[in-house]
Amino acid sequence: MAETTFPGRTPRTPGTWTSRGRTRRSTRTVRVRVSAAVVAAVVLAVLVVPPLVQLDQQAVDLSLKLRPPSPAHPFGTDDVGRDLLLRCVYGLRVSLLVGLVAALAATVVGTAVGAAAAAFGGWTDRLVMRLVDTFASVPHLLLGIFIVAMFRPGVWPVIVSVALTHWLSTARIVRSEVLSLRSRPYIDAAVSGGASRWRVTYRHLLPAVLPQAGLAAVLMVPHAMWHESALSFLGLGLPAHQASLGNLVQTARGSLLAGDWWPTLFPGLFLIIPTLAIAGLAGAWRERLDPRRRSELML
């Protein structure tokens, strides 16, 4: 049967689809490898550099104030003469720690809430989802500012703030997955066999949604890092003396206005590049979980 064509369009041959699919797979492979290399470099830097060079040992030397990038200081120096490369590594370490712990806590809360709402259904589901909609109607940053304002600046108030404002999307994802799984034959068989709702949820539903919850946690890490940086930039996150990417950008504002670009550029790159790399790995994970997306890449 001849392929239907439309005016102005060139008919596609099977070879065209194969070539396009090969190009997509090649691009995806390159993206995943680059993302994995960046994430590995980030993990290696935050694990190896801080134990070798203590931040407190970096003496303030005003004679080196705001030196541009050079072989001795590849990223230049900050406004009190400290090496900016080491400051960025320490800041990335703190921001990544906050992002990982906050994403894990938010994923645990969201998974528990979403699974319970879908498993029990009825008024429980309606009540929980109205609660989720209420929290979602408030901007994350505004709610985070309200939470951290009740505590002294520190790491744990920021983690609590990010966790309490980022569990909503995970709860919705897990709820939709559990609702689709409740109609599966093996769930009906377990219920017919006398299994309670808690047992069905714990033994069958939760293990099935763990890959989706893990993907949500990975995607949440960059968002949590940006959230922490925004709070620190506003002066409500980590203490000003503690190295974090948000604090580094905040203290470099005056230098940028004076024409010194490196104190702002490099902390910003340390925030942007790792988040893009983590998002790239998460995108590859999503493609593996979605059979339809996998079949498109094979064309």
Image: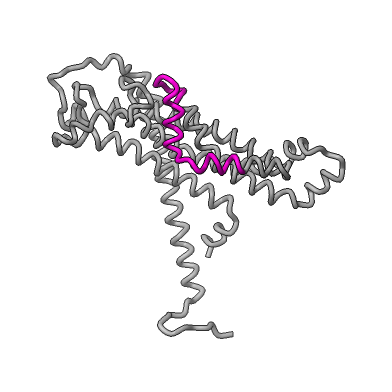
Horizontal side of residue 238 vs 19, given as left or right = left
| Residue 99 coordinates in the image, percent (x, y) | 45, 32
Magenta stretch, main secondary structure class: helix
Q: In the depicted view, which residue is nearer to us: 143 or 162?
A: 143
Horizontal side of residue 198 vs 143, given as left or right = right
Task: Please determine whether, in this image, residue 126 is positioned above or below residue 47.
Answer: below
Quarter of the image for residue 55 reads: top left
Q: Residue at x 47, y 32 (%)?
A: 162
Q: In the depicted view, which residue is nearer to us: 40 or 217?
A: 217
| Residue 75 coordinates in the image, percent (x, y) | 23, 32
Q: Residue at x 19, y 26 (%)?
A: 72
Task: Please determine whether, in this image, residue 95 is positioned above or below residue 2.
Answer: above
Q: Specify start and end residues of the magenta stretch as a single range.
A: 130-158
| Residue 257 coordinates in the image, percent (x, y) | 16, 36
Is 137 magenta? The answer is yes
Task: Please determine whether, in this image, residue 58 is positioned above or below residue 294.
Answer: above
Quarter of the image for residue 34 reads: top left
Q: Quadrant of the N terminus?
A: bottom right
Horizontal side of residue 241 vs 263, given as left or right = right
Q: In the depicted view, which residue is nearer to us: 65 or 287?
A: 65
Is 173 magenta? The answer is no
Residue 207 visible to the viewer: no
Quarter of the image for residue 275 reads: top left
Q: Residue at x 78, y 39 (%)?
A: 197
Residue 227 visible to the viewer: yes
Task: Please determine whether, in this image, residue 62 is positioned above or below residue 100.
Answer: above
Q: Residue at x 70, y 40 (%)?
A: 124
Residue at the right extreme?
193
| Residue 217 coordinates in the image, percent (x, y) | 53, 38
